[in-house]
Image: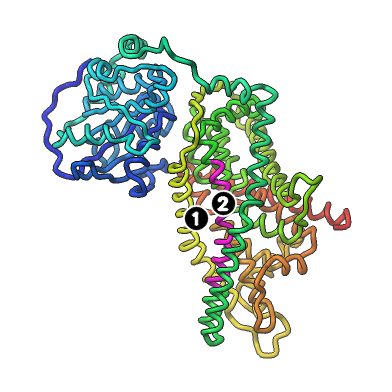
Amino acid sequence: MGAVEKPAQAVAQTPMVALLGNPNCGKTALFNRLTGARQKVANYAGVTIERKEGQFTSPAGRPFRLLDLPGAYSLSAHTPDEEITRDVVAGLRKGESAPDVVVCVVDATNLRLNLRLVLEIKRLGLPMVLSLNMMDVAKKRGIAVDANKLSRELGMPVVETIAVQSGGEKALLEQLDSMWPMQLGTPNPLAAIDAVPVEQTQQEVRRILSLVVNNTADTGNFSEKIDDVVLHPVAGPVILAVLMFLVFQAVFSWAAVPMDFIKESVEGVGAVVKDHMADGVLRSLLVDGILGGVGSVLVFLPQILILFFFILVLEDCGYLPRAAFLLDRLMGGVGLSGRAFIPLLSSFACAIPGVMAARTIQNPRDRLVTIMIAPLMTCSARLPVYALVIAAFIPDRMVGGLVNLQGLVLFALYVSGIVSAMAVAYFMKRTMGANRQQPLMLELPSYHIPHLRNLGLGLWERAKIFLSRVGTIILTLMVLLWALSSFPGAPEGATHPAIWYSVAGMLGRGLEYIFAPIGFNWQICIALVPGLAAREVAVGALGTVYALSQTGDELAAQLEPILSQSWPLPTALALLAWYVFAPQCISTLSVVRRETGHVRYALMMAGYMFALAYTASFLTYRIALALGG
């Protein structure tokens, strides 16, 4: 079906180019190649689906805006991600016009799957360019694609790109320059897509492939040979478990040196401030409130980045979908699909992207259950608390000469979160109504060697997010906590530390009546309050509380010896158990409300996680006491 001719006008402003394609086609790598660091990430209005936009300048000096649309297999949307892609391309988003040019990125080694989307977009009648990506991989495999003939069959420009190589975007840039000035028209109605049956579209795909692709010399996909081992029913789960175990060991081992550097740097700056300022409220604010609070959270940045690094490597090399496949049977036993694995794995970094990633799950019940259990995955915000308590109470020694005991405890905490999530999912499956288990349909991309540029950009984005939290939310909370911990001051002749008489001390003593049965003292209760906004703030809060509770001029430089001397072991273990199930931060609860469309699910999540956290801490504390802890 040909496009309906419409009046067109030249684009006077900076044209918008939209990148669109199937998942795993290299679209985001091409986006990073074109924009570099000149990109911003936000959400589409009204939803929490990520909107990545950047800018670039062509060789001819012309500026362009670039939009990276969520991956889609078809414009006949089945998931929220695909709905956004469809609406943006069709110009149906309120306050947002259709893109001036659509660059459809396809995997040259998998045109059979990719071309259906291309033909659907073509029916909208928008200016299009086909980016034949991963041509280097296709040539190595012996797959010959005639780009000129493909261009004639599709009726659009076709360019070869290699998104992961410098200069691999050159042909695309030249093509965009040749289309200047761009003509802006109105997309055809979406009915133009449905006017052609899917069977006819697939028949057209096969016809085009028979003309433009020659794979008689195809040496085969090396990924299939690797998958014979990686997806083996016995070896596969063992490999996955070993990989996850090594990740958690590395989080502790690799981060030691940079963490020491950050800690010493912050302490050095604090010492300089103390030496050059008179004792008073302002010095206390700078040293105890700002440097002490923010520095105690910033020190965990290396561990968080190491965790992100491994997640990005596994994602970039193509292993994550295999892990989902391996876990499909196990997760099916608790009522989930293997497709839930990636959202749950994303939740190890932060529950917010994990909740958002559940949009790719088509079954509404499975999507809701995945959202509800995603926060039980041990997010990076828990890591500072885990690291602090483990370092203070768990000896730094090797077990069996092979593994570090502290890393082993951390691994056990992560496993506890996973097991509890599966148990909650099973309970929800039994109470939310029985649904027939749907078979997992998942594309397994070819393995790739991770590219350092993409890894660097990914880590930089996540570091910026963490640092922005340190500089905004955490800084604000630390200053607020410092104020609550400092005022009103201790009266003359006071017998308790100054914080005892402060607003924070009063609040902590009030909460202690609720948390005393699980072994929490009033200092811990104070730290739990700002943790509702950001859980990593709890470490800074403890630092502020204990620093201000000391007598004399010398403030404690480290929390670890203070905690190990002032807390009994059962209290420390109970706090670790609390953070396995810790009630969610406000940001996550707000995202849950937006993703589900109902506040009741956010309240349900907060309620059941509080109940789990309190119960687990109570049992841990009482058992530890009974065992003589």
Q: Name the residue under label 1.
A: 466
Mark 2: few/some/many CA within 10 Å (<14, 14-19, 20+) = many
Find the distance from the CA under tag 1 to the CA under tag 2: 9 Å
The amino acid on which the numbered mark 2 sits, given as a three-letter code, is Ile
Q: Mark 2 points at which residue?
A: 304
Query: On the rendered image, what quadrant is the C terminus found in?
Result: bottom right
In the image, 85: left or right of 271? left
Viewer-proximal residue among 50 and 244: 244
Q: In the image, is residue 308 part of the stretch drawn in magenta? A: yes
Query: On the rendered image, what quadrant is the N terminus found in?
Result: top left
Snapshot quadrant of residue 553: bottom right
Snapshot quadrant of residue 73: top left
Viewer-proximal residue among 610 and 443: 443
Q: Which of marks 1 and 2 is in front?
A: 2
Under circle 1, the secondary element is helix
Q: In this view, does 584 lie above or below 268?
A: above
First of labels 1, 2 by sequence position: 2
In the image, 217: left or right of 615? left
